Image (cartoon, grey):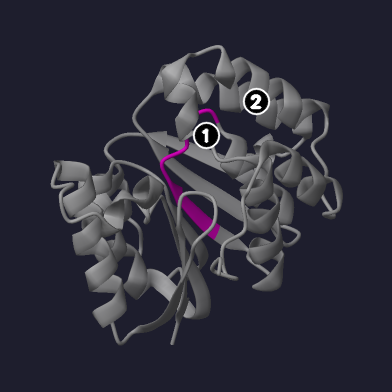
Amino acid sequence: MPDIRTLPVTAELIDYAVAHGSWPVDDVLADLQAETAALGRVAGMQVGPDEGQLLTLLTRLVDARRAVEVGTFTGYSSLCIARGLAPGGSLLCCDVSEEWTALGRRAWERAGVADRIELRIAPAIETLRALPADEPIDLAFIDADKPGYVGYWEELVPRVRPGGLLLADNVLWSGEIANPERTDENTEALRAFNDRVAADDRVEAAVLPAFDGLTIARKG
């Protein structure tokens, strides 16, 4: 008997789901997807439109006025978060690539959200450590180098307000996270991160087995 929890997620099913969400893919997002795809293999780092919709919704759910993104790439996820911000809200993006984020900057301008986004090109851990402790964050999204996840988490959790959200992408690593034979640096780093979140009594967390695995944690 097949596992009733298993749903084959096809491209057609994702398109159907996105079409029935509140934020369908518009020309700005479609063009950004195409530009990113032209970069080649690295395009796999971009979130999909289904995850983008969820980011917008989660941002709205917590009425986020101050959000932080660690790992911006070409700006798709940041655009989706910025669209969900409360009036007067702002998003701080941390990345190290001027080349990739330049695509994002253009898309943000076209989408009319550039005034809500601040991009800092520097090692993210340095940017996070410099954030003031008395300006609480409503929502944080981690989607960057995997060995850095635990460090980013430790900097962000104290700064997120009670009831705020921390999100982390790629935590199931194409399903390899549960493969004991996979012991490369990224997989081991994600295992350490997942163990840290599960043991962290400052948050309530669930791992969503969708996309590439998304941790959703609420600060207590």
Please provide the residue range marked out in magenta: 67-74
Instruction: Answer left or right for 191 relative to 160.
Output: left
Residue drawn at the location 77% of the way across and 41% of the way down = 15
Residue drawn at the location 47% of the way across and 14% of the way down = 40
Q: Quadrant of residue 79?
A: top right
Per the image, the residue denoted by label 2 is 33
Instruction: Answer left or right for 29 relative to 90.
Output: right
Residue 69 on the magenta span = yes
State the SS at label 2: helix
The quadrant the C terminus occupies is: bottom left
Q: Amino acid at mark 2?
A: Gln
Q: Amino acid at mark 1?
A: Gln
Circles 2 and 1, Cβ within 8 Å, touching? The answer is yes
Is 72 located above or below residue 157 in the figure?
A: above
Residue drawn at the location 68% of the way across and 42% of the way down = 49
| Residue 133 shows in the view | no
Relative image position of residue 147 (x, y in whole percent): 20, 47
Q: Residues within 10 Å of mark 2 (few under 14, many from 20)?
A: many
In front of the other: 49 or 91: 49
Residue lying at the far front in this picture: please name it: 1
| Residue 120 shows in the view | yes
Label 2, label 1: how far apart the Cα atoms are: 8 Å
Residue 36 on the magenta span = no
Per the image, the residue denoted by label 1 is 46
Is 218 located above or below residue 43 in the figure?
A: below
In front of the other: 26 or 175: 175
Relative image position of residue 30 (x, y in whole percent): 74, 26
State the SS at label 1: loop
In front of the other: 187 or 147: 187
